[in-house]
């Protein structure tokens, strides 16, 4: 019942989500090196969420007997020179992921694959949240990050983020 194009895009999304996790670990590592452990925590939690997304796509495919192939995950090579860089790169990356989710949705819609559309609904909503969070981080850094006290407080706040498993259960 599944369309070839939809199956291919779902499989590609697994790699993109794992890459997101890897990219955010790269950002976390940068902040760790900078002594900003709160930011490092925020991006480590984000990486865990991205891994969960990859697992959700994997599980959805397995549940529906669609063949899963794990492809190579690229090296995260975003150059980080200042504290703002990773925040801006996150927003750009999330916009890329949103477009990717929408592309799968469009293919599912064209194929009248209502099951995949329903599965993707959660991700459409999730992406809106991811973009908002990335955008909020940029705004906070613009407002407070230029002052060392402000940066310290912001780092404390980023440090309070805790991992929670995804609300979508398959
Ligand atoms: Mg994701």
Image (cartoon, rainbow, N blue to C red):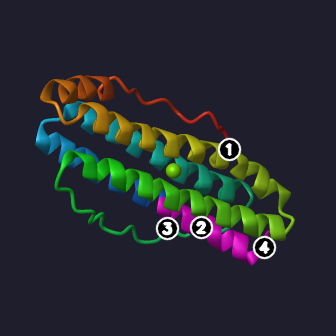
Q: Of residues 43 and 163, which is closer to you in this image?
A: 43
The mark lying in front, picked from 2 and 1, is 1
Q: Which residue is mark 1?
A: 122
In the figure, 155 relative to 127: above or below? above
> Which quarter of the rendering shows the N terminus?
bottom right
Image coordinates for residue 22, horizontal then vertical, percent = 35, 55
Upstream in sequence: badge 1 or badge 4: 4
Image coordinates for residue 93, horizontal then vertical, percent = 43, 58
Q: Which residue is mark 2?
A: 11
Callout 3 touching callout 1 (CB < 8 Å): no
The mark lying in front, picked from 3 and 2, is 2
Q: Secondary structure at mark 1?
A: helix
> Which quarter of the rendering shows the C terminus?
top right
Please say whether residue 58 is visible from this viewpoint. yes
Other-residue count near label 4 (Cα within 10 Å), few / some / many at <14 / 14–19 / ≥20: few
The span shown in magenta is: 1-16
Q: Which residue is mark 4?
A: 3
The mark lying in front, picked from 4 and 3, is 4
């Amino acid at each position: 019942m599944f369309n070839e194009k939809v199956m291919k895009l779902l499989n590609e999304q697994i790699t993109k989500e794992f890459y997101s996790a890897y990219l955010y670990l790269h950002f976390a590592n940068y902040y760790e090196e900078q002594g900003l452990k709160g930011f490092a925590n925020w991006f480590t939690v984000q990486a865990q969420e991205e891994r969960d997304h990859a697992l959700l796509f994997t599980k959805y495919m397995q549940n529906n007997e669609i063949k899963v192939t794990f492809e190579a995950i690229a090296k995260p090579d975003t150059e980080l020179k200042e504290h703002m860089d990773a925040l801006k790169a996150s927003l750009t990356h999330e916009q890329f992921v949103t477009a990717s989710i929408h592309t799968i949705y469009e293919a599912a819609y064209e194929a009248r694959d209502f099951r995949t559309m329903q599965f993707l609904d959660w991700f459409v909503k999730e992406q809106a949240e991811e973009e908002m969070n990335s955008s909020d981080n940029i705004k906070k850094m613009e407002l407070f990050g230029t002052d060392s006290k402000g940066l310290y407080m912001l780092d404390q706040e980023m440090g309070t983020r805790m991992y929670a498993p995804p609300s979508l259960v398959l």
